[in-house]
Image (cartoon, grey):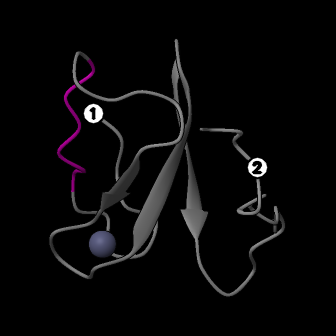
Amino acid sequence: MPCCTECENSLDVELDEVEEGDVIACEECGTEYEVVGVEPLELVRIGDDLDEDDEDPLDEEEEEE
Ligand SMILES: [Zn+2]
């Protein structure tokens, strides 16, 4: 079970239920972690030192008639 790097609380992560891209929040301090890998489980803290700022391509055009 991974621990929160902020408060060392155990993060409640169900390995069966998480997948890459999921965000987990620490129940104690609210720090959020993104799941970047599941085997092995790898979490990165989402916070002020965010080093990945992907811009979501929200303007994908779908041709629908
Ligand atoms: Zn915490």
Q: Is residue 15 above or below residue 33?
A: above
Query: In the drawing, does residue 35 fall left or right of residue 1?
Result: right
Whether residue 43 appears in magenta in the rendering, the answer is: no
65 or 35, which is in the foreground? Answer: 65
Q: Along the horizontal axis of the image, is 25 left or right of 21?
A: left
Q: Which quadrant holds the C terminus? A: top right
Boundaries of the magenta span: 10-15
63 relative to 57, above or below:
above
Left or right of 6? Residue 34 is right
Q: Position of residue 56 (x, y in %)?
A: 74, 61
SS for dot 1: loop
Above or below for 52 versus 49: above
Which residue corresponds to mark 1? Answer: 1
Residue at 67 percent across and 87 percent down: it is: 48
Q: Earlier in the sequence, mark 2 or mark 1?
A: 1
Give x and y (percent) for residue 36.
61, 37
Query: In the picture, residue 29 is in which quadrant?
Result: bottom left
> Could you classify mark 1 by the number of other residues whose Cα lies within 10 Å: few (under 14), some (14-19), or many (20 or more)?
few
Name the amino acid type tagged 1: Met
Where is mark 2, residue-wise? 61
Q: Nearer the viewer, mark 2 or mark 1?
A: 2
Q: Nearer the viewer, residue 48 or 58?
A: 58
At x 32%, y 29%, the residue is 18
